[in-house]
Image (tube, rainbow, N blue to C red):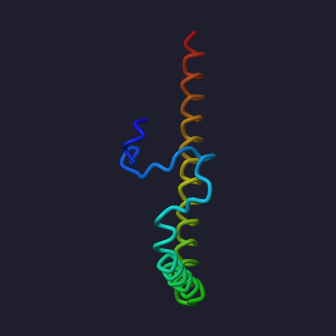
Amino acid sequence: MNNNNPYYYGYPYYGHAGQQGNQEQPYKKQNSKTHFAMGLVAGAAVAYIISNKKFQQGVAATGEKAWSTVRGEVEELKERLEDTQAELEYYRNLHKSEE
């Protein structure tokens, strides 16, 4: 790597991990209050959504519908498999009688 270029693949280059020492990355110094505020707002939004009864009921209803659909599809798949097995058995027996 060229030591005159402070960027490595478009990102600031701070040297090897052992050579960084006490250097703090610039975004941590400049945006610590912004990161805290955004985290606080995001956490409050998630807490509000999770504690909302209508949201909980909607999630439960959607989960029930999804589970019901999955169960129905599994049952349909089982029936198709049984039909296929029955057809195979029929054709095996059909060819056995011809021999």
Viewer-nearest residue: 36 or 3: 3
**Horizontal and vertical percent for residue 15?**
52, 46
Viewer-nearest residue: 80 or 5: 5
Check the image and report above or below for 21 versus 92. Answer: below
Extreme-top residue of the structure? 99
Viewer-nearest residue: 59 or 90: 59
**Horizontal and vertical percent for residue 1?**
43, 35
Give the number of marks.
0
- Relative to 1, 69 lies left or right: right
Q: Which image quarter: residue 9?
A: top left
Viewer-nearest residue: 6 or 9: 6
Check the image and report above or below for 61 versus 12. Answer: below
Residue at left 55%, top 86%? Answer: 44
**Horizontal and vertical percent for residue 74?**
58, 53
**Horizontal and vertical percent for residue 33?**
50, 80
Extreme-front residue of the structure? 4
Residue at left 62%, top 54%? Answer: 21
Residue at left 51%, top 71%? Answer: 29
The quadrant the C terminus occupies is top right
Check the image and report above or below for 63 versus 7. Answer: below
Residue at left 60%, top 22%? Answer: 93
